[in-house]
Image (cartoon, grey):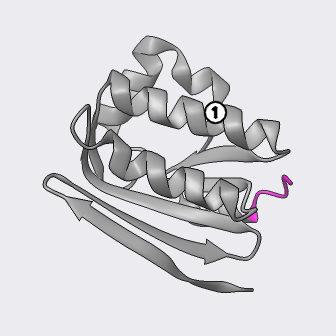
Amino acid sequence: MDHGMLGSAQSGRLLVEVRQEGVSAVVTPAGELDHHTADLLREPLEECLAQGLTRLVVDCTRLDFCDSTGLNVLLGARLKAEAAGGEVHLAGMQPVVARVFEITGVEAVFTLHDSVEAALSDGST
């Protein structure tokens, strides 16, 4: 399986790492995803799509907080990925973050997985 680190960026409360696993880009935000840090996640998601990696797996295991701006970043990435024939999978969501997705109903539009490994082994796309 082809895999390798594509990059990372950090700003204050959020670190974002990106690596390629086969046909998927695994994007790992760690920390707090909010109005002040949203672009730090938006930019690598858009860069992956621009490079033709349209199957995005967002590893949420290290995401401690997500507000409405963060939700909008993920929803925007989903729309762009689907327009390019791809999809966005969310993996390993922490209960506090999962609750935000549940309350807003956003969980219904994403494919959710217990782990990154499960998301990568999902036969979609």
Residue at 65% across / 45% down in the picture?
88
Q: Which residue is mark 1?
A: 110
Instruction: Look at the image and tell me in which quarter the C terminus lies.
Output: bottom right
State which region is magenta: 121-125
* Residue for point 69% across, 38% down: 80
Instruction: Check the image and name the residue furthest to the top.
Output: 104
Secondary structure of the magenta portion, mostly? loop
The residue at the far left in this view is 12
> x, y (%) of residue 58?
52, 53
Is residue 104 toward the left or the right of residue 31 in the image?
Answer: right
Q: Nearer the viewer, residue 64 or 53?
A: 53
Horizontal arrangement in the rendering, residue 57 relative to residue 102 (left or right): right
49 relative to 6 in the view: left or right: right
Q: Secondary structure at mark 1?
A: loop
User: Vertical placement of 28 versus 99: above or below?
Assistant: below
Q: Nearer the viewer, residue 118 or 50?
A: 50
Asked whether residue 114 appears in the rendered view, the answer is no
Residue 66: quarter of image = top left
Q: Quadrant of residue 84?
A: top right
Position of 120 with respect to 102 (left or right) is right
Q: Position of residue 86 (x, y in %)?
A: 79, 47
| Three-letter amino acid code at the position of disc 1 | Phe
Q: Residues within 10 Å of mark 1 (few under 14, many from 20)?
A: some
Please name whichever residue, 113 or 12, is drawn nearer the observer in this view of the structure: 12
- Residue 77 to residue 9: above or below: above
Q: Which residue is at a point 63% across and 22% down the rendered structure image?
A: 108
Q: Is residue 48 above or below residue 21?
A: above
